Image (cartoon, helix red, strand yellow):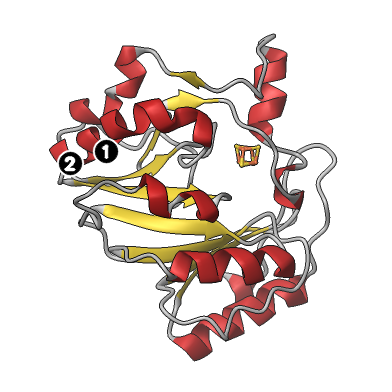
Amino acid sequence: MGKDTGIDWADHTWNPWQGCRKVSAGCANCYMYRDKKRFGQDPATVIRSKPRTFSFPLRLKEPGVVFVCSWSDFFIEDADEWRSDAWEIMRKTPHLTYQLLTKRPENIKERLPEDWPLKNVWLGVTAENQEQADYRIPALQEIPAALRFVSVEPMLERVVIHNHTGLSWVICGGESGYGFRPMEERWAESLLHQCCAMGTLFFMKQMAGKKPIPEHLQCRELPISI
Ligand code: SF4
């Protein structure tokens, strides 16, 4: 099965559950809220996906990168009942690399399985502004993981991360879609420079709105997956 996601740094998206509640400034224009409302569904109610969707990775036979929970947060409390089934699927598919990106790092520790860290699971947090970077990155650093990453998206201000160690990969992106908030080019430049200084891989996803990525920011590094 080839690439089936619009996410630039993954081959597949897997949504074992859907629905979420907004937790910080980065959530203001959450596309899941917009899409669910369009379908007449309540975005704040978290539901387990149908069995075929829940078991989707079991049908992927080739190695690939799977972004988990683009329509929820993997560590949201409402999914506690279902998470062990999701871990089991990750264990059964060691040829796939899973990316777990959360805005709830305070929930991670007590929700990890006994055999953590799983070799094929990367752990990341969103740091859309300095306040969240200062809170979520230290919380992430406390947890062992095959790889730790940070997504500065939507980037809402200049974010300083260079005082944090143990980060392998940083994603940077401005907001897109209706009502997008602006991102200044120099904020992204600063993040790229910080990553160069730290020896951290950097992936420039997009500028805000439809603005093209300037040439000097065209850097799309990816960690090596399984
Ligand atoms: S955590 Fe993610 S899925 Fe949940 S409301 Fe915020 S942006 Fe949307």
Residue drawn at x 44%, y 79% is 200
Residue 127 percent across, percent down from the top left: 63, 62
Residue 181 percent across, percent down from the top left: 83, 52
Q: Amino acid at mark 2?
A: Arg
Residue under label 2: 91
Residue under label 1: 87
Instruction: Give the structural element (helix, strand or loop) at label 2.
Output: helix
Q: Is residue 3 visible?
A: yes
Question: Is 104 drawn above or below residue 3 in the view shown?
Answer: below
Q: Which mark is residue 95?
A: none
Q: Quadrant of residue 156?
A: bottom right
Residue 226 percent across, percent down from the top left: 20, 56
In what quadrant of the picture does the N terminus appear? top left
Residue drawn at x 53%, y 71% is 138
Q: Amino acid at mark 1?
A: Trp
In the visual, does 198 lie left or right of 153? left
- The residue nearer to you, when weighing 137 against 27, is 137
Instruction: Give the structural element (helix, strand or loop) at label 1.
Output: helix
Residue 69 percent across, percent down from the top left: 47, 36
Contact check, label 2 and label 1, Cβ < 8 Å: yes
Question: Is 96 drawn above or below residue 134 in the view shown?
Answer: above
The residue at the far top in this view is 40
Task: Establish whether ligand 1 lies closer than 8 Å to the Cβ of label 2.
Answer: no
- Displayed-image quarter of ligand 1: top right
Q: Quadrant of residue 137?
A: bottom right
